[in-house]
Structures are given as C-alpha cells and as structure tokens.
Amino acid sequence: MSQQINSVPSFGERIADAIEHNFLIVGLITSQTQAKRQTLNLPFGVGKTSLAFWLSYGLNGYNWDTVFERAAYNPVAVDRMLQPGTNRRNIAIWDDVQMTAPAEKTVPKPIIQLAGKITTSRPQLALLLMTAPNINSISAPLRRLVTFEIIVAERGSYEIQQYRYTKNFEDPKNDYCKLYYIEEGSFPALPADIQDRYDVWREKEKKKISRSTSHNIEAYCPLYEEQPEGTKIEMKATVRRSGSLYVVSVPRDYGEKLYNSKREVSLVVPSQ
C-alpha cells in the first residue's frame, strides 16, 4: 500500500508507462541510508528482498514461479535474461548486487560491459530492480543507471526517491543530480512457504559463487596451519637450486602429506 506525497507521477505509474511504451527503469532497494524518513540504518535483514519479491509478484501475474524464474544473484544470470531476442519481461530482480558487483576503484571489464548492455535492454526488460545495503556499495557503472531508489526505513515500510538530472550551465559536462521524494508505503512479510523457498534459492545461488570467492580470499591471505606432532623420521633429501634459493626436495609421498604445513627440519651439514 503506497501513499503519494506530491503531484509527480507515482512509481507505479512510471512502471506502467515503461511497460506500455517500451521504456526501461532501473531501481535499487536499499536500507542503510536515511532520506526523508527516520530509518533503522541497518544494511541487512530489514526486508529489501521481501519488497522486491512482492513488486515482482504483482508485475508477473501473481505467479511465484515466474518471480523466481526472473530473479538473479549474479551477473551471468542477469546477462542471460538480457540476451537479444528473448521475450520482454516486466521486471527482473538482481539480489544482493554488492556481492558480485561491489564498489571498487578498478571496475572489472565484464561489469562495465554488463552495465552498457543494460542501457540497451529495453526490448527485453521494463524494470530491473536491484537490492543492496546502499547505493555506494555497488559498482559505479551500475550506480549511474539507478533512476529510483526505494529505501526500506524499517521492516514493512519504505519511501521512494527519484534521481533527476538538470543541466549545469556553468559546467555543462557535469550535470546536477538531485533526489525528489515520490511516495511512501508499506508491505507485508513474504508468505512462510515463499520465504522458505527463497532461503533455499539464495543458498543455492550463493554456492555458485562461493568457490571462486573462497579461492580469491585464500589467494589473498594464504594460511599455513600448524600440524600436530607425528612420528619423527630420518631421511635423506636432495638439496636443489630454485632461482636464488636452495630448497630441500623430499619424496612425493612425504611431500603430499607435508604440503603447506610448517615443520622443523634438522639438517646435518658436512664438516669443511
């Protein structure tokens, strides 16, 4: 249920216009940043996805199966929905954008390309609705596409702000950008069975990217865990040269057991 505050077109009217006249709207649901209404200022767990799914439910013929079919958790899934020649969708959701397209100084080229693709995707989509803690947490190319920000002040209530650009005549290559308050409203929690279905869907989607994420983290901060003391052995090893260093080579069966572990090694150095 929404309450319009001023005379400008409502968010619903904008969406209906986009669907009817082949426009494209990019919206972002956030919760961390306060605008007009007092908020809990929480980045997670206040209902951003619940609101996104309710909006998708209404725009997808009140069919939950279609809602899940048109929900994405990574750029690959978004890209597949925007392939030329696919049937036009009223709405698609990109959940937790900060997970796979976070704000970084150096934006990955695929994200730049996807943002460019979105700008030309009105034949495939009327509304792309993303969720993230705040607009500053997502990649800059995606951030610049947002025209409506829906801010969840607390679980069950929201406000909608529109980004509008006006010409800066003193510096015409850098437009002014301002927020305009559109409306506010409320929404219920998802039905219990749909919430359970979403939890399973989200867990499955997270697993798709978890392996590469963990690999990157481990490469950034490799861990070498101490191994428990075992049987001490004496063995002959070969000293080899590796670049500017000299290393000790051990047989494969021992090397596989000791790989990436810290061990004390005693060397017998021949007398001069």
Image (tube, rainbow, N blue to C red):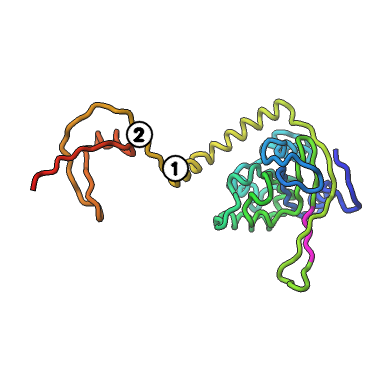
Residues 57 and 33: in front is 33
Q: What residue is pinned by disc 1?
A: 218
**Secondary structure, magenta segment, majority class:** strand
Q: What residue is pinned by disc 2?
A: 226
Image: 75 above or below 207: below
Q: Residue furthest front?
A: 272
Hey, what amino acid is under mark 1? Glu
Q: Quadrant of the N terminus?
A: top right
Name the residue: 47% across, 44% down: 217
Position of 255 compared to 138: left or right? Answer: left
Residue 146, horizontal then vertical, whole percent: 72, 53
Which residue range is magenta in the image?
A: 162-166
Image: 163 above or below 212: below
- Report the disc number at residue 95: none
Helix, strand or loop at label 2? It is: loop
Q: Residue furthest bottom?
A: 170
Q: Residues within 10 Å of mark 2 (few under 14, many from 20)?
A: few
Position of 25 compared to 99: left or right? Answer: right
The number of numbered badges drawn on the structure is 2
Residue 190, horizontal then vertical, whole percent: 74, 31
Mark 1 or mark 2, whichever is nearer to me = 2
Name the residue: 29% across, 33% down: 257
